[in-house]
Amino acid sequence: MRKVTIAKGDGIGPEIMEAVLKIIKKSNTPIDFEEIEIGEKVYLSGNTSGISDASWDVIRKNKVLLKAPITTPQGGGYKSLNVTMRKALGLFANIRPCVSLHPFVATNFPKLDVVIVRENEEDLYAGIEHQQTDEVVQCLKLISRPGCEKIIRYAFEYAQNYGRKKVTCFSKDNIMKQTDGLFHQVFKEIAMEYPNIEANHMIIDIGTAYLADHPEKFDVIVTSNLYGDIISDVAAQIAGSVGLAGSVNIGNECSMFEAIHGSAPDIAGQNIANPSGLLQAAIAMLYHLGYATEATRIQNAWLKTLEDGIHTADIYNDSLSKQLVGTSEFADAVIANFDKVPNILKADTPPKNSVIQLPEYKRKEASQKDLLGVDLFVHWSGVDANILAEKLKALTTESMDLVMISNRGVKVWPNGFSETFCTDHWRCRFQSNQPLEKNVIVTLLGEAIDLGIDVIKTENLYQFNGVKAYSMGQGQ
């Protein structure tokens, strides 16, 4: 008997969880459930993370968590439990299937059937932020090769196992050539290992616009964290309802399955909430655990229930619906439809292999890494880059020259434009044509201190195997 951790959450969480557990138990899936408490009560007890150490132990022991929505209290320094769980448990992949249920759920896109595979751990969501000057704060965008390889390979494996024909990569590598450039490069490398699956790439802005207008053209989309967060909600909404979508979070050791909607405290306890989002998450959980037969049986029963016009209030429509039911009654209707399949909606079929196992990441041989210079980020309240350049030239050594000053990524010296608006945050590049020793940078920083130049941050400039690995900045 496989044991799964469950968390009933807040608001409508307990009642939709009870409905989902009723369906799973009636399907005779060999699963035992161990409950933990997370969310609002834990937060308000004084635990700012919303989860106790004992609950962490249960999750890590059972490896699988089915979680209902929770409420995070406003203010008070409370942390997002969802973000904490994804990072702490190494849940690198977020999977969002979005499919039209036309004509039973209103949508302008009756042929929509797309899966968003979103990287879940890094990118701007690493949350590394600093205020550096009076006027400028920064957020570091971190993209790693292991992170790219895991999420992109998972997308292709998912497509292969679930009979999908195409994987599309979304990035913005025409602007962010190093970070998004790495994501796109790894996509091209891994796509070659799956010759039977069509692979293509789109810039995120036009890709999102096209997804919102022609979603039927997409099959599986793989992208980084921030982009994935946005487009997965776009896809779920145009499919008909965010409330019907489930979310899957996959890691090498643990996994978490949840609805994507909130805890809706305004309708809690009224037996009117739709349990479908959490049920979709639970069905994905069963596939992940290898119970494909049971998962398919429940999914087809759910589709048949919608097709029969048995609807909760959120999707009830006088012209299509036949019976308005509550949360518990909807679960009973799904159970009554076990072993039936829909006639209009596309029936579910078991995947080729619902349990996706990725190979262990293998680090590539280290590159030849050479230091070519340094960017000094300077807090200076002036507005004329030529004046700052004269100050910085006093730092120029025989090893490095001041070659460029930029402000918010735009070159303002040499040959800058007077029209360019500048903040008090200046990137000042010192560069050499030959590899350097790091002590040259230490000497440069010491001289800056002696001259009263406020260096707030440095970034070393490297080349790897003879290829420069840093952005040149706009206007250069």
Image (cartoon, rainbow, N blue to C red):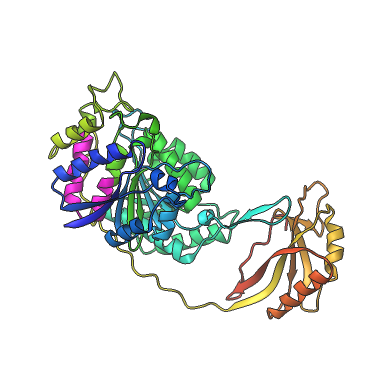
Span colored in magenta: 282-304
Residue at 61% from the left image edge and 68% from the top image edge? 469
Decide whether residue 263 is among the magenta residues: no
Q: Please state if 131 lies on the left or on the right of 152 as rendered.
A: right
Q: How many marks?
A: 0
Residue 243 image offset from top left, x and y in percent: 36, 35
The relative height of residue 428 versus residue 38 in the rendered view (above or below) is: below
Q: Residue furthest front?
A: 45
Residue found 45% across the figure and 52% down from its top = 49
> Is-magenta flag for residue 301?
yes
Q: Is residue 156 visible?
A: no
Image quadrant holding the C terminus, namely bottom right
In percent of width and height, residue 18 lies at: 24, 40
Residue in front for this viewpoint, 274 or 115: 274
Q: Is residue 246 left or right of residue 363?
A: left
Quarter the N terminus occupies: bottom left
The reply to whether residue 278 is visible in this rendering is yes
| Left or right: 392, with 59 as reference point | right
What residue is drawn where x is 30% and y is 53%? 65
Horizontal side of 438 relative to 417 (left or right) equals left
Q: Main secondary structure of the magenta part?
A: helix
Q: Position of residue 239 (x, y in %)?
A: 37, 35
Rendered image quadrant of residue 326: top left
The quadrant in which residue 269 appears is: top left
